[in-house]
C-alpha cells in the first residue's frame, strides 16, 4: 500500500512508519508539522529507505494535505496534541489539531475515496474502577485532551454513517518505548533518574494504567487497517496493568538509583484513577500483544541509556522551561 501517515514524526507514528516500510514494504508519505514532540531524528533509521518521503505540514492545512495525498490508498492519522497536562494549560492547540485537523483529513479521504484509520486513546472512556472498557462502553472524557479526541472519534464515525467513508478507529492504552518525548511518565522518570533529578509523582501514585509496548500497538493499528470492518472501533490494550508508583519504583531499580529521588507533588486536576481496555475484538482479528511490561520497560530503559544523542537536545531545549513551569524546579 501507499499510506499517508499523519503525525508520523511522533513517537507512535514513527514506530508505525518504520514497521510498514521495513516489515511490510509499504510506501509511506509522512505529513507532520514538527511540533515539540515531532522530530525528524525519529527517521534516522529509515531516512534513505526506498518508499519513504516526508512533507512538513499541518493536518488542519487543507493545501498541505492535498499536496501529500497524491497516489495514497489510505490515511492513518496519528497527528494530535496528546499531553493531558498541556491540554489543561493550553487547550486551544488541542481543539485545532485534534478537531479541525481530523475534519480536514476526513474531507480529503472522502474526496479521494480513501480508507481512513483514526488512532485514538483509552482516555475517551474516562476512568473505570473495576473491569475493562469495551468498544461499547460510554464515552466520558475528563480533560481537554480526551474531550478533543472523543470529538474527533465521533466525527470519524459520522463520516462513515453519513458519507459511507471506509473509516475505522483504533484506541490504545498507555504506550511506552523508544523515542517517546520525555513529558510522559516513563521517559520522564527514566531520564530524571539517569540524571539524578527528582522523580515527581502525582498525588499518591496509585493511578493504574494498562501499559502497551509501542511496537505492539503499532502492529495492532496495521492489523486493523488491513482487517478491520469499516465503521467499527477496536481497542488495543497491553498485557499488564501497573500503578504509577510501581512503575517509578521499577525504573529506580533498573537505573540503579534509590527511592530518595521520589517526590510526591500535587495531583493533576481531574486525574483519572484507572484505565483498562478489553482487546477481545482486535484479538479476534488475529492480533496479540507480544511484549510483557517487565520486558518492555527494561528494553526502554536500556534504549534511553544508550541513545543520549536523541534525548540530550530535548532536555537542553524548550522542554526545560516547560518542566520548570510544570513542576516548579529546574533540571540538572
Image: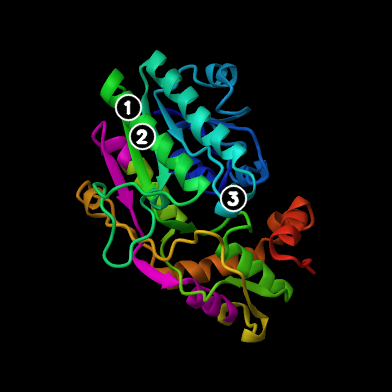
The crowd level at tag 2 (other Cα within 10 Å; few <14, some 14-19, many 20+) is: some
Q: Position of residue 178 (x, y in %)?
A: 56, 57
Q: Position of residue 102 (x, y in %)?
A: 47, 30
Residue 262 image-quadrant placement: bottom right
The reply to whether residue 83 is in sight is yes
Residue that carries the numbered disc 1 in the rendered image:
158
Q: Position of residue 241 (x, y in %)?
A: 38, 69
Q: Nearer the viewer, mark 3 or mark 2?
A: 3
- Magenta residues span 224-252
Q: Nearer the viewer, mark 1 or mark 3?
A: 3
Q: Position of residue 292 (x, y in %)?
A: 38, 68
Residue that carries the numbered disc 2 in the rendered image:
154
- Relative side of 60 to 150, left or right: right
Say whether residue 234 is magenta.
yes
Q: Secondary structure at mark 1?
A: helix
**In the rendered image of this protein, does residue 134 appear above or below residue 272?**
above
Residue in the foreground of this view, choosing between 326 and 29: 326
Q: Secondary structure at mark 3?
A: helix
The crowd level at tag 3 (other Cα within 10 Å; few <14, some 14-19, many 20+) is: some
Cα gap from disc 1 to disc 2, whole angstroms: 6 Å
Going from N to C along the chain, the mark reached first, 1 or 3, is: 3
The answer to the question of whether label 1 and label 2 lie on touching residues, with beta carbons closer than 8 A, is yes
Cα gap from disc 3 to disc 2, whole angstroms: 22 Å
Residue that carries the numbered disc 3 in the rendered image:
88
Q: Residue at x 53, y 16 (%)?
A: 66
**In the rendered image of this protein, does residue 149 appear above or below residue 279?**
above
- Relative side of 174 to 50, left or right: left
**In the rendered image of this protein, does residue 201 appear above or below residue 109?**
below
**Which residue appears farthest toward the top when viewing the image?**
111
Q: Residue at x 77, y 67 (%)?
A: 331
Say whether residue 81 is magenta.
no
Identify the image quadrant of the N terminus: top left
Amino acid at each position: 500500500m501507499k499510506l499517508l501517515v499523519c503525525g508520523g514524526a511522533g513517537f507512535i507514528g514513527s514506530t508505525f512508519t518504520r514497521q510498514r516500510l521495513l516489515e511490510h514494504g509499504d510506501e509511506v508519505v509522512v505529513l507532520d508539522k514538527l511540533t515539540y514532540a515531532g522530530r525528524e531524528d525519529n527517521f534516522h533509521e529509515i531516512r534513505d529507505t526506498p518508499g519513504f518521503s516526508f512533507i512538513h505540514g499541518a493536518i488542519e492545512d487543507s493545501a498541505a494535505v492535498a499536496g501529500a495525498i497524491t497516489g495514497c490508498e489510505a490515511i492513518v492519522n496519528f497527528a494530535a496534541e496528546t499531553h493531558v497536562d498541556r491540554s489543561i494549560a493550553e487547550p486551544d492547540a488541542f481543539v485545532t489539531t485534534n478537531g479541525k485537523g481530523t475534519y480536514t483529513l476526513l474531507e480529503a479521504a472522502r474526496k479521494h475515496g480513501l480508507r481512513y484509520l483514526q488512532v485514538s486513546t483509552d482516555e475517551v472512556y474516562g476512568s473505570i474502577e473495576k473491569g475493562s472498557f469495551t468498544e461499547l462502553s460510554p464515552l466520558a472524557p475528563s480533560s481537554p485532551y480526551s474531550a478533543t479526541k472523543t470529538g474527533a472519534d465521533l466525527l470519524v464515525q459520522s463520516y462513515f454513517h453519513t458519507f459511507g467513508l471506509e473509516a475505522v478507529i483504533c484506541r490504545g492504552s498507555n504506550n511506552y518505548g523508544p523515542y517517546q518525548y520525555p513529558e510522559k511518565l516513563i521517559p520522564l522518570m527514566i531520564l530524571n533518574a539517569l540524571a539524578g533529578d527528582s522523580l515527581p509523582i502525582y498525588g499518591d501514585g496509585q493511578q493504574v494504567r494498562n501499559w502497551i509496548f509501542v511496537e505492539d500497538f503499532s502492529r495492532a493499528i496495521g492489523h486493523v487497517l488491513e482487517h478491520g470492518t469499516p465503521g467499527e472501533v477496536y481497542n488495543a490494550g497491553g498485557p499488564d496493568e501497573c500503578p504509577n508508583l510501581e512503575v517509578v519504583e521499577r525504573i529506580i531499580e533498573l537505573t540503579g538509583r534509590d527511592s530518595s529521588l521520589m517526590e510526591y507533588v500535587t495531583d493533576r486536576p481531574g486525574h483519572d484513577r484507572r484505565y483498562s481496555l478489553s482487546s477481545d475484538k482486535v484479538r479476534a482479528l488475529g492480533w496479540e500483544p507480544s511484549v510483557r511490561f517487565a520486558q518492555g520497560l527494561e528494553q526502554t530503559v536500556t534504549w534511553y541509556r544508550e541513545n543520549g544523542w536523541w534525548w540530550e537536545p530535548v532536555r537542553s531545549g524548550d522542554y526545560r522551561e516547560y518542566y520548570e513551569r510544570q513542576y516548579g524546579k529546574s533540571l540538572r
